[in-house]
């Protein structure tokens, strides 16, 4: 069965520091990869997605992610974190062989300290 | 566009009661889905629909029913509420199937079952 792993439940970074959130998945074929962000009490918003092509994708709010097929990873990065980035981040994966249903990781809660 | 709307925002039920969570979208999306969000478990798919008149089960369908009589609406019914159904419920829609397209999420319904 497909699975998505986000190894870090909580991450705390200082404002202005760089950020990397990890995501690993288990699939046989090239999946569709997403990162969503959820602010407290809100629904989820798409940050970025990868379907094919350039393995480094740019998203909103200055985020980027890199697809590494050899490592089955799709890590999210930001060079300089702002206090408003504090939220919960979800990696999600879809694949045609699983009916194109989206599977989410458990999420990583980001705290930003000033 | 209102996007994806959900009602109610909060609900408290007693064990054994039934209720319907409402979801509507005005983007003419064919694909709609319901997720539940529990701490440390990310979002799990309950039911989904690929178009009016067509529904299917997701990962955690037990205790829930859905129907899709129109493109716009996708209500979720709890038949006999149980404490294990205490959760935050999100409705989502997309133009294409859920794993291969951007999902647009509603603001969520926070349900407590006593």
Image (spheres, rainbow, N blue to C red):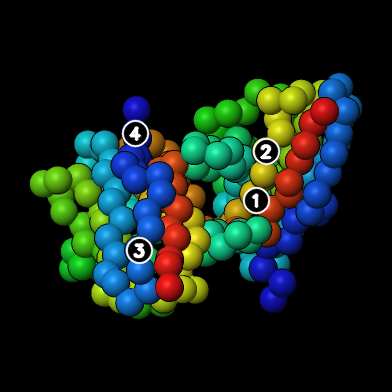
Nearer the observer, B106 or A81: A81
Which residue appears at 69% of the width and 25% of the height? B84
Nearer the observer, A71 or B66: A71
Local secondary structure at mark 2:
strand
Residue B10: x percent and y percent? Answer: 80, 49
Give the crowd class for mark 2: few <14, some 14-19, many >=20 residues within 10 Å. some
Marks 1/3 same chain: no
How far apart marks 1 and 4 lie (CA) works out to 22 Å
Quarter of the image where the C terminus of chain A is located: bottom left
- For label 4, the residue is A2
2 and 3 marks in contact (CB < 8 Å): no
The quadrant in which residue A4 appears is top left
- For label 3, the residue is A13
Residue A50: x percent and y percent? Answer: 30, 61
Task: Answer yes or no: is residue B11 visible.
Answer: yes
Of labels 1 and 3, the one closer to you: 3
In the orientation shown, which residue stands out farthest toward the left? A70
How far apart marks 4 and 3 lie (CA) works out to 30 Å
- For label 2, the residue is B87
Quarter of the image where the N terminus of chain A is located: top left
| Marks 4 and 3, the one that precedes in the sequence | 4
How far apart marks 2 and 3 lie (CA) works out to 29 Å
Local secondary structure at mark 4:
loop
- For label 1, the residue is B91
> Which chain is home to disc 4?
A
């Amino acid at each position: 069965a497909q699975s998505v792993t986000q190894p870090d439940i909580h991450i705390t970074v200082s404002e202005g520091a760089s950020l990397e959130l990890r995501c690993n998945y288990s699939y046989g074929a090239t999946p569709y990869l997403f990162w969503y962000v959820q602010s407290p009490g809100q629904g989820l918003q798409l940050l970025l997605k990868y379907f094919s092509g350039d393995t480094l994708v740019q998203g909103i709010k200055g985020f980027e992610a890199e697809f590494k097929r050899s490592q089955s990873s799709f890590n999210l990065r930001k060079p300089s974190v702002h206090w408003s980035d504090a939220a919960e981040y979800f990696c999600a994966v879809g694949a045609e062989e699983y009916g194109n249903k989206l599977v989410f990781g458990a999420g990583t809660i980001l705290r930003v300290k000033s | 566009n209102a996007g994806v709307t959900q009602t109610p925002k909060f609900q408290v039920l007693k064990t054994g009661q039934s209720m319907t969570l409402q979801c509507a979208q005005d983007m003419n999306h064919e694909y709609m889905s319901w997720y539940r969000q529990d701490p440390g478990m990310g979002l799990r798919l309950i039911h989904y629909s690929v178009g009016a008149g067509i529904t299917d089960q997701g990962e955690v369908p037990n205790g829930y029913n859905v129907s899709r009589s129109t493109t716009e609406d996708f209500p979720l019914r709890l038949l006999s509420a149980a404490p294990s159904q205490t959760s935050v419920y999100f409705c989502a829609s997309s133009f294409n199937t859920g794993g291969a397209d951007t999902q647009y999420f509603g603001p969520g319904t926070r349900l407590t079952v006593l």
